[in-house]
Image (cartoon, grey):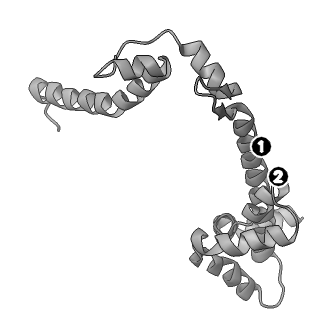
């Protein structure tokens, strides 16, 4: 039986609250800084912890772009976030579809060198991304897919990790269930 001590409960809660404050304070300061102009941030030392009056203008400027007071052009973030969302969805759906089909074939179909095919897929996990960046860029460039959505997504669709995970799942399905599905 665990005994409850009110003092220990208070101390543990105080430590947890302190941890939350330490973690969220930089996020709060960043948000407060985003509501102030550059002049307001530079004028106050230390930075003010009260929200400024520039919230709407700052976020409109960040999302839709524009020119700074110094004349520099700021790219809009909203289209970039849309492209990131679209590429993430395409990559995720493509990875699931290809990995699911390849794992299903490796587990349930009988063909020569089935284990060799699996291990060739699995060995690609040993190649870190840093090793594959150069050759992947060269292949995409040679195919004329630079600066296109297909050039961004197609190289990232193949996934040995997902194939391995689906294979491991399919191997846990009982043979009786597979036979019942065939009938």
Q: Residue 133 occupies which quadrant of the picture? A: bottom right
- Check disc 2 and report its element: helix, strand or loop: helix
- Residue nearest the viewer, comparing 141 with 70: 70
Assess whether mark 1 and mark 2 are in contact (beta carbons under 8 angstroms).
yes
For the point 75% across and 46% down, the residue is 89
Name of the residue lying farthest toward the top = 53
- Residue nearest the viewer, comparing 54 with 13: 54
Screen quadrant of the N terminus: top left
- Residue nearest the viewer, comparing 29 with 53: 53
Name of the residue lying farthest toward the front = 70
Residue 166: x, y in percent?
A: 69, 64
Quick check: 24 left or right of 9?
A: right
For the point 58% across and 27% down, the residue is 70
Screen quadrant of the C terminus: bottom right
Query: Would you name the residue on which mark 2 appears?
Result: 149
Q: Is residue 54 above or below residue 178?
A: above
Residue 125: x, y in percent?
A: 60, 74
Q: Residue 57 occupies which quadrant of the picture? A: top right
Circle nearer the viewer, 2 or 1: 2
Query: Would you name the residue on which mark 1 appears?
Result: 86
For the residue carrying disc 2, how many other residues have a C-alpha within 10 Å: few (<14), some (14-19), or many (20+)?
few
* Residue 124 makes an appearance in the image: yes
Quick check: 36 left or right of 183?
A: left
- Of labels 2 and 1, earlier in sequence is 1
Q: Is residue 173 above or below residue 56?
A: below
For the point 37% across and 12% down, the residue is 50
How far apart are labels 2 and 1 at the CA level?
A: 9 Å
- Residue nearest the viewer, comparing 114 with 146: 146
- Check disc 1 and report its element: helix, strand or loop: helix
């Amino acid at each position: 039986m665990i005994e409850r001590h009110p003092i220990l409960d208070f101390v543990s809660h105080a430590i947890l609250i302190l941890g939350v404050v330490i973690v969220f304070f930089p996020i709060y300061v960043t948000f407060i800084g985003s509501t102030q102009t550059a002049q307001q941030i530079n004028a106050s030392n230390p930075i003010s912890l009260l929200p400024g009056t520039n919230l709407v203008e700052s976020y409109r400027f960040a999302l839709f772009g524009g020119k700074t007071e110094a004349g520099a052009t700021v790219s809009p973030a909203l289209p970039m976030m849309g492209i990131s969302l679209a590429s993430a969805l395409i990559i995720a759906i493509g990875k699931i579809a290809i990995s699911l089909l390849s794992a299903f074939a490796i587990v349930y179909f009988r063909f020569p060198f089935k284990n060799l095919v699996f291990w060739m897929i699995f060995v690609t996990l040993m190649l870190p991304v840093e090793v594959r960046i150069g050759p992947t860029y060269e292949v995409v460039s040679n195919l004329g897919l630079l600066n296109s959505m297909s050039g961004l997504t197609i190289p990232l669709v193949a996934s040995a990790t997902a194939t391995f995970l689906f294979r491991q799942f399919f191997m846990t399905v009982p043979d009786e269930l597979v036979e019942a599905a065939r009938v």
